Structure formats: structure tokens, C-alpha cells
Image: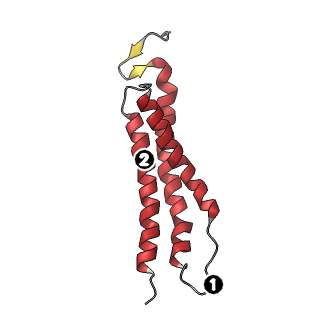
Amino acid sequence: MPTNQEFSAWGPYEARGLRIVLGCLGLLAVIGGAVASIPLFVWAAIQRAPNPSPFPTEALLGLVPALASIAIGAWAWRGRRVRSLLWGFAIFAGLTALVVVAAMVSMALLLFQQP
């Protein structure tokens, strides 16, 4: 049984749970960003209609995993808690989710302009 002072090739044994959380939260961030982009795309597409719909505040809940992934990845990186590059995966996945949402909203605003 390893003690807290022992290390594996991937970092301290006590950081095994953190590595799992970083990986799962990164995947959840990308999925949440993709799901959140759908109602935001529809909202931005019909914004110039005579009766626009209200802002879908529920869709912002899909961005919570992306922001949490970035925050926990930065926390793990700054504290040197994980030696592997999973902190980078978590940050990259969170940023990718935010870029997907921003791209979908900007595409809706550009494609559905009324002359």
C-alpha cells in the first residue's frame, strides 16, 4: 500500500482522484457547452423578429461545467497538484466549450440578419 510520500510516474498517489475529476469535468464541459449553444443559437437567430423570445437563462447552466473546468484546471496547475498534463486538458476543454458557444451565437447573428 503506497503512502502519501510515494510517487508514481504520473505524480503523487493522492492526486489520482484529482486526475479523474479533471478528465471527467473536461468532457462534461465540452458536452455542456455544446448543449448550451443550441438554445443560445435559436435565441440569437430570432432576436430580430417582431416578437423576440426572452433570453434563455437556463442555457447558462450549461456553461457552469466549462467555467468550473477552467477554474479547477488552473488551481491544479498553479498548486502543482498534478504532474501530468490533465490540468491542461481541463483548461483546454473549458475554453473549447466557451468558444463553441461564442461561435454559435455569432454565426446566428451573422447568418440571420434581416436586410
- Horizontal and vertical percent for residue 70? 47, 43
- Horizontal and vertical percent for residue 89? 39, 40
Q: Classify 10 Å Cα crowding around label 1: few (below 14), some (14-19), many (20 and above).
A: few
Q: Is residue 52 left or right of residue 11?
A: right
Earlier residue among tags 2 and 1: 1
* Residue 51 versus residue 57 in the image, above or below: below
Instruction: Give the amino acid at mark 2.
Output: Ala
* Residue at screen point 64% across, 60% down: 58
Return the residue at label 2.
Answer: 93
Q: CA distance from mark 2 to mark 1?
A: 36 Å
The front one of 7 and 49 is 49
* Residue 14 versus residue 77 in the image, above or below: above
Q: Secondary structure at mark 2?
A: helix
Return the residue at label 1.
Answer: 51
* Residue 53 versus residue 114 in the image, above or below: above
Asked if marks 2 and 1 touch (Cβ < 8 Å), the reply is no
Instruction: Give the amino acid at mark 1.
Output: Asn
- Horizontal and vertical percent for residue 24? 50, 40
Location of the C terminus by quadrant is bottom left
Residue 115, label in figure: none
The front one of 36 and 48 is 48
- Horizontal and vertical percent for residue 113? 44, 83
- Looking at this view, name the residue that lies furthest to the bottom: 115
Q: Secondary structure at mark 1?
A: loop
* Residue at screen point 50% across, 53% down: 31
User: Residue 5's image quarter?
Assistant: top left
* Residue at screen point 55% across, 79% down: 46
* Residue at screen point 58% across, 58% down: 60
Give the label, 2 or 1, closer to the camera.
1
Tell me, what colour scheme is on the image?
secondary structure
Q: Classify 10 Å Cα crowding around label 2: few (below 14), some (14-19), many (20 and above).
A: many
- Total numbered labels placed on residues in the image: 2
